[in-house]
């Protein structure tokens, strides 16, 4: 009788439970992931110098990721989360067995072999592994992370051998973290009604920006802003490698990030907060017009809008995005312009004969 009563109640309640399942929103994976790494930051009791450095780098990024999520800037929140969790996931790997039990080079090499078995399946992803990921910004972030696992893994062995095993373990953790970043982007993919953007190879744009960069690399600017030149050049190199691998969404993302880093080094018309706000408003309308997924451009728009909403407004960050980066985004979606023929490489060798020799 008791079992029959329980089944009767369950049958009566089943329609209400089904209705509730249909109306309740699905769990927010992005919010949960941010919360997970916030908890790791709060509760991790490690006191070693490596953890202190990683924590110092990750804490402000996690705070800014949470702030962007609270403001509805989900793409910006994801970008910052991926940057922060790269450090935090590496730390989590180093602090847990078996990595935490490594004491010498022999133990490190054994762990390197073991991690190769864990990660190797992702070293040669099938062509178009992220083709179905939507929106485009999430695909771009995933594509940018896709080659990193193999790069970090390969670098970790000689680094650990030639410095200390702990440093090699850090890069092994970074390799695992990059693979996890791709998995996170895959899990955040959602079908959308908008058409994919017409992203193509940005090779011509990458080369043109590199020429601008080299032309600007002159003293005193090359001395005073050397780290900015290095950062922009590094992003362009990564953009070129992603493009060569056919990961054109990731290549476009890195190209635009390089342009954003380089923009303050270029002579440009100064804009005040009102002018920047007007330009961002027009760009926001353009990004929303039509039936195209412009989330990759919107990622940069969110950063500029956040900067302009700060008190006082951060015009130095917002202005280059409005005046240079987002126009480059739209230009990169247009058909590629014919490239002018390049001069053939030429080497001139001059032989100088010393007298009486």
Image (spheres, grey):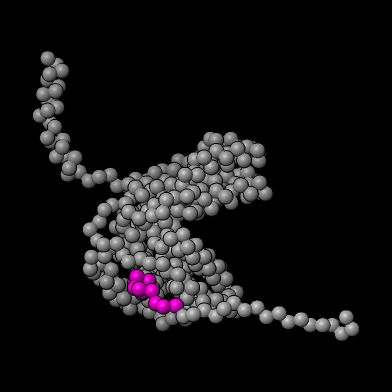
Instruction: Report the residue at 14% width, 27% height from top.
Output: 10
Is 134 above or below relative to 94? below
Residue at 12% from the left image edge and 14% from the top image edge? 1
* Residue 308 visible (yes or no): no
Q: Position of residue 250 (x, y in %)?
A: 42, 61
Q: Which residues are magenta?
A: 330-339
Q: Name the side, left or right, on which 148 lies relative to 317.
A: right
In-front residue for pair 6/53: 6
Residue at left 61%, top 47%? Answer: 157
Q: Main secondary structure of the magenta part?
A: loop
The residue lying at 37 percent from left, 46 percent from top is 33
The relative height of residue 100 versus residue 233 in the rendered view (above or below) is above
Name the one closer to the observer, 16 or 202. 202
Left or right: where 271 falls relative to 4: right
Image coordinates of residue 195 in percent, x first then y, are 26, 62
On the image, which quarter does residue 246 sit in? bottom left
- Foreground pick, 164 / 345: 345
């Amino acid at each position: 009788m008791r079992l029959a009563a329980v089944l009767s109640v369950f049958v009566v309640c089943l329609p209400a439970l089904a209705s509730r399942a249909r109306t309740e929103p699905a769990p927010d994976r992005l919010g949960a992931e941010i919360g997970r790494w916030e908890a790791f930051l709060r509760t991790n009791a490690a006191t070693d110098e490596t953890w202190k450095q990683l924590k110092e780098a990750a804490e402000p990024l996690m705070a800014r990721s949470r702030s962007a999520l609270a403001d509805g800037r989900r793409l910006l929140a994801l970008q910052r989360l991926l940057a922060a969790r790269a450090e935090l996931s590496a730390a989590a790997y180093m602090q847990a067995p078996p990595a935490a039990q490594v004491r010498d080079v022999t133990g490190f090499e054994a762990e390197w072999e073991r991690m190769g078995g864990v990660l190797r399946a992702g070293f040669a992803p099938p062509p178009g592994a992220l083709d179905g990921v939507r929106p485009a910004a999430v695909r771009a972030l995933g594509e940018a992370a896709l080659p990193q696992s193999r790069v970090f893994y390969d670098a970790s062995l000689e680094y650990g051998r030639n410095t200390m095993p702990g440093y090699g373990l850090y890069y092994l953790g970074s390799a695992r973290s990059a693979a996890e970043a791709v998995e996170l982007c895959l899990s955040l993919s959602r079908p959308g009604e908008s058409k994919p953007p017409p992203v193509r190879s940005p090779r011509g744009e990458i080369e043109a920006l590199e020429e601008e960069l080299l032309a600007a690399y002159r003293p005193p600017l090359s001395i005073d802003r050397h780290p900015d030149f290095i950062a922009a050049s590094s992003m362009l190199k990564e953009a070129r490698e992603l493009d060569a691998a056919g990961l054109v969404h990731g290549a476009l993302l890195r190209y635009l990030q390089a342009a954003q880093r380089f923009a303050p080094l270029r002579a440009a018309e100064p804009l005040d907060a009102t002018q920047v706000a007007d330009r961002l408003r027009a760009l926001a309308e353009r990004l929303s017009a039509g039936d195209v997924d412009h989330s990759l451009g919107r990622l940069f728009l969110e950063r500029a809008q956040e900067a302009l909403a700060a008190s006082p407004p951060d015009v130095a960050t917002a202005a280059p995005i409005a005046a240079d980066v987002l126009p480059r985004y739209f230009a990169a979606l247009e058909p590629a312009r014919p490239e002018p023929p390049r001069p053939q490489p030429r080497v001139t060798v001059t032989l100088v004969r010393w007298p009486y020799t």
